[in-house]
Image (cartoon, coloured by chain):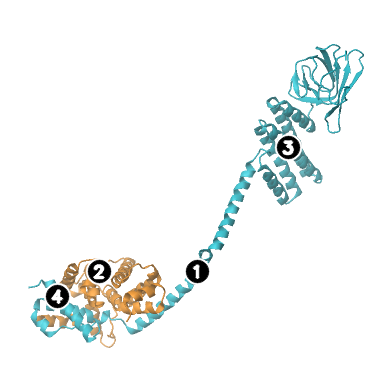
Amino acid sequence: MKPLEERLNDRLEQARLDIRRNGLHPGGLTLPERERESDPEVDGLVVLAQRLQQAHQIQVAPDFAGQLERRLLRRHAELRLQQRIRRYSFFSLLRARPVLSAVLGVCLLVCLMSISVLALAAQVTNPSNPLYGLKRWEQQVQVQMSGSSVAQASLDLQFVQDQLKALPANSAHTEAYRQALIELDEQIDTAAAAIDKLPAGAQHARLASELASVKRDAIQELRSLLPRLALPERLATTGELARLGDTVPTLTHATLVLPEHPNGQATIILEGSMIQAKAQLLVNGAVVDASGTFQPDQVVFAVAWNGELYPRSLGILNPDGTAAETTAITITGATNGNQSGHSNQPTPHGKPTVTPTPHGNRPEAIPTPHH
Amino acid sequence: MEAIEQVLDYARQGNAEALSALYRRFLPGIFGYIATRVPDRATAEDLTSDVFLQMVEGIHRLKAKDEAGFTAWLLRIARVTVAGYYRAREKQPAHLSLPGDSWEDMQAEPLAVQGSDPEADPVQWTEAREEWQVVVSAINQLTEEQRQVLVGRLLLGYDVATVARMLGKQTSAVKALQFRALQSLQRLLGKSHRPLPALQQYKKEEGE
């Protein structure tokens, strides 16, 4: 004999199939007479199942069923509408149009790159860096965007201070340092012009005072940099110090007195101001060993001369690091004490010109008295 | 008639008619399941509404491809909804007790019994209400699997194999669950000392 659960299931299954065959409502599980009599052990359970199926408490009220169906369809329509709206939302649009999303992606990338480059440019201090121009442009835009002329002058002053701070970093690189020095000079001029444009008053006085302070700082900074610099940069720095109002040496004229005999002693007389004792002689931008006699506003050097090229420039290097040069050079012979006829005169461009020798346009060597 | 799998596909794609068809097909089973778990019809209707609204909102995410999978999903929603109802009332169905030595031990719940008017025949109405309370209490003492077997077999009219797929069990296990569910109900309902009108017939038939 089959186990109870099998017999119960057979009875329930038979009833279920009867319902399907007879087209009865699923709730109407019937108990066939023959089955009921044949297995009393499961009859009670089958009847219980039937009663549960038929319990009116679990039958759906038609009104409720209809209302709920309408409610569900309304909710469904709302959801469809929301989906349709979402479909036309921004991201859906991007998904639907790959070209548009690609273009927007590229634009976004360009924007990000631009922002990165601008941020990078703002950190650049080396004027020879290609991004430095961008930094200057950013500064100009900042000045343009600032509302008042006071704010513009303040910004200009701020840029001078920034430039001054960046100067030591460039001192090791000749070209960058020179460029930075030129930038500093220009920015000081710009700031001074912006402050000059301001009407007299407290703001003008404050900014003028700040500019003077910045200039003092600049002098101090440049002087501290002098010992680290090569001679050409020292000359440039000395020039900038002079423009900032510092006391620096200047040369107005140089005279070269050639020796009577080859390999003799030439005399170089340099005239100017602020020439310090123990200043060194510069010939063509290089320090030359020579003993000097210092007088107020003049120094006389005696130097061994053995048929070198005519000097293009002569100058001095003061012990404090400042330097001065001149290309206004007069060359004379020692015998008559007069000019030999060879004279380097500065051109309008500052380069010395040499009076042609009898041998040609460019003298090869200093002529001896015997020639 | 279209296969339920086809209807499911249409419903998943947002077809309103397919959704209606599913609703009509599963309303009796889901309502029956909920009505045997909560004490009154109004609550059963509210919870049934919640279940089918969730069906409408979530059917596009449904992964089930066949009827058994869909039924299991819907019954899962129904079970969670009923549990939420009891949690909200700080009352767990498992703690509902059947009447003990006296009928008065049973907790009174507001019951709305279909087909009876309390003003016309208050005695009959009260009896019917109390009777159903006993049935709800008895069904709440079954395991969830036993309840789902009864819903599948008796309310949705599935064969054993479909119910087995729905529950992820062997057919023999489903037959055993079915037997134990009805046996437990018989035992729990038989404990009541007071004759219950709707069960009198059953007891009478059992006696025969």
- Could you say which chain is coloured orange in the image? B
Q: Nearer the viewer, residue B133 or B3?
A: B3
Chain that is coloured cyan in the picture: A
The kind of residue on which mark 1 rests is Arg
Q: What's the distance in space between the residues labelled 4 and 2, CA to CA?
A: 20 Å
Q: Identify which amino acid the numbered label 4 is placed on.
A: Leu
Q: Residue furthest front?
A: A359
Q: Residue furthest bottom?
A: B120
Q: Position of residue A313 (x, y in %)?
A: 81, 24
On screen, A179 above or below B56?
Answer: above
Q: Is residue A153 left or right of residue B5?
A: right
Judging by the rendered image, the residue that carries numbered circle 4 is A8
Mark 1 vs mark 3: give the one in front.
1
> Would residue A357 be found to the left or right of residue B3 on screen?
right
Q: In the figure, B4 relative to A278: above or below? A: below
Q: Identify the subunit bearing mark 1.
A: A
Number of on-image labels? 4
Between the C-alphas of marks 3 and 4, the distance is 103 Å
Specify the label residue A87 is tagged with. Answer: 1
Which quadrant of the rendered structure holds the N terminus of chain A?
Answer: bottom left
The residue under label 2 is: B165
Label 2 sits on a secondary structure element that is: helix
- Of B140 and B105, the residue lying toward us: B140
